[in-house]
Amino acid sequence: MASSGGGEEEQEQRLAASLTARYSEWVVEALDELPDNFVLTDPAMPGHPIVYSSRGLLAMSGYARGEVLGRNARVFQGAATDRAVVAQIRDAVRAQRAHQAVLLNYRRDGSPHWILLHLCPVFDAGDGRVLHFLAVQVPIAARRRLAEAPAKAVLSACREEARGEEDLGCASHAGEVFVDMDKRGLEAEEPRVASDWEKEKALIAANSIFSVLNRYSKLTGLVVCGKRCDSVGIPALSSFLNLSLGRIKQSFVLTDPHLPDMPIVYASDAFLSLTGYSRQEILGRNCRFLNGPGTSMEVLEEIDDCVCSERACTVHLINYRKDGRSFCDLLHISPVRNITGKVAFHVWVHLDEGSKNDFNGLSPEVWQLGAVGAVKVAVRSLSASGSLLRPTR
């Protein structure tokens, strides 16, 4: 170790900088508190290495963190790889899109285990670059045998001595992730199929991880999200709905629960004044961009529960303006249903509890409910005529 200590130390610094330069010095500690099994990889570094591995994944796989960091994700691979599904995963990485696959991974001791892999890119909210890939692994419980297995994805173990024998000759390192290079090992077990509960668990874990990454990336100014976070691809609201919402003077945003990562599709002028962001910086982003180091995880979990169950809630939490200043946010969130009763949006009404506001003799809570009511009236009246969204050309 002494003879190569300089090179190893330099490599460790590069791996650490992949996280800290983007998410601040405290991100590793925050990620370590999460119970999920996952890794973060950096496609910009040679070999597309793992730059972070969660404690849960280390416990599940039997590896020490030092044995995983700096290595390609095929460190978890074993025998009986289904090349077709591995190619699908590689294509998803190269196309920079999310993907789910059932894989037969291998622990450090060589024992196989089935997992659901939930793979998704982490984008720079400003320029849309892929900064990392997040790979969540959810163990798949044994169930009854299948008469006919679906297309299975099996990653095969990359023993240290085999890793250098078959390197891809790609100009980009992105496609190197999850590529099987080793056909040796144990026979494959009976294929398994991920349940809806396991798929939902993977999605919830990914959202939780993105929430942490988003909060800490805000400290460096390099805000991240789960998709290219510009307004391209976000359905535009109709001019009629925009006009109706523009008459509401409170600070609020609308989010669309039917789009990936529930992005903001409308932001009021008062919300822009409160946070210091421009409308272009907000549209297409998840509300997590307001969070920071002082934001309570318990409150965020409460918000997630209420949003998922389509319930209204009022919470107190610390949020952050664009210039980094925090404020005590009295936040009311409510589902907004269309004329058929289906949730079309969620309205998030923000109020700085530290500011001196004139609520026309009303309490802050009643003032917020007034905004919610006005939004619901606008959405329901326009949904009856089918003019919530701008017609596509």
Image: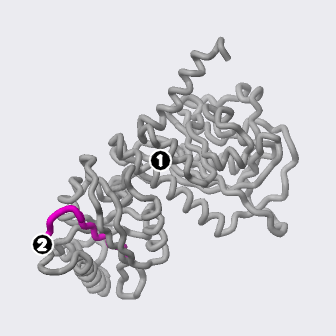
The answer to whether 78 appears left or right of 71 in the picture is right
Q: Give the residue pinned by disc 2.
A: 358
| Crowd around label 2: few <14 · some 14–19 · many ≥20 (10 Å) | few
Q: Where is residue 330 shown, x and y percent of the image?
A: 29, 68
Q: Where is residue 288 shown, x and y percent of the image?
A: 38, 57
Look at 35% across and 79% down and name the residue there. 336
Look at 25% across and 54% down and name the residue there. 280
Verify CB contact (< 8 Å) between mark 2 and mark 1.
Answer: no
The C terminus - image quarter: bottom left
Q: Give the residue pinned by disc 1.
A: 122
- Under mark 2, the amino acid is Asp
The N terminus - image quarter: top right
Magenta region, residue range:
344-358
- Up the image or down, 118 lies above or below 271; here it is above
The answer to whether 279 appears left or right of 337 in the picture is left
Q: Where is residue 215 shown, x and y percent of the image?
A: 40, 50
